[in-house]
Image (cartoon, rainbow, N blue to C red):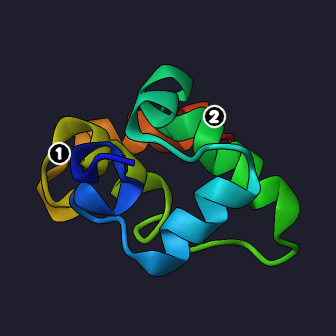
Amino acid sequence: MKAQNRLESLPNIGTTLAERLRSVGVSTVKQLEELGAVEAYKRIQNQIPEKLPVCYNLYSLEGALQNIDWRKLSEKQKNKLLLEAGRI
């Protein structure tokens, strides 16, 4: 697999989050782009009984898709993600 298509090539995605994505059928950057951050987060959340920290999962996925550090997401963007993910 080309390095640029590896999930770990994106910002915010390390080994753990990449493994979680793969466990729900997302193994490439293209697949993540097609699915979107919220749906990918929901799929991961459905497999893990405890609530996942949104900053290390939902926000990280969105930041990865935008090619930015998740801490650079605006409060408006974060609130929209939380709403779409059913967290508020």
**Percent x, y of residue 38:** 55, 37
Foreground pick, 9 / 88 = 9
- Find numbered disc 2 in the image and state the secondary structure of the residue it sits on: helix
* Residue at x 36%, y 52% (from the top left corner): 6
Q: Is residue 87 visible?
A: no
* Residue at x 64%, y 72% (from the top left corner): 52
Q: Is residue 28 visible?
A: yes
**Percent x, y of residue 20:** 64, 65
* Residue at x 50%, y 64% (from the top left corner): 18
- Find numbered disc 1 in the image and state the secondary structure of the residue it sits on: loop
Amino acid type at circle 1 is Ser
Foreground pick, 12 / 84 = 12
* Residue at x 17%, y 45% (from the top left corner): 74
Q: Is residue 88 left or right of residue 8?
A: right
**Percent x, y of residue 28:** 47, 42
Foreground pick, 6 / 79 = 6
Mark 1 and mark 2 residues within 8 Å of each other at the beta carbon: no
Nearest to the eye among marks 1 and 2: give it: 2
Amino acid type at circle 2 is Glu
Mark 1 surroundings: few (<14), some (14-19) or many (≥20) residues within 10 A:
few
Give residue 42's mark.
Answer: none
Q: Which residue is mark 1?
A: 74
Give residue 39's mark.
Answer: 2
**Percent x, y of residue 88:** 62, 47
Label total for image: 2
Mark 2 surroundings: few (<14), some (14-19) or many (≥20) residues within 10 A:
some
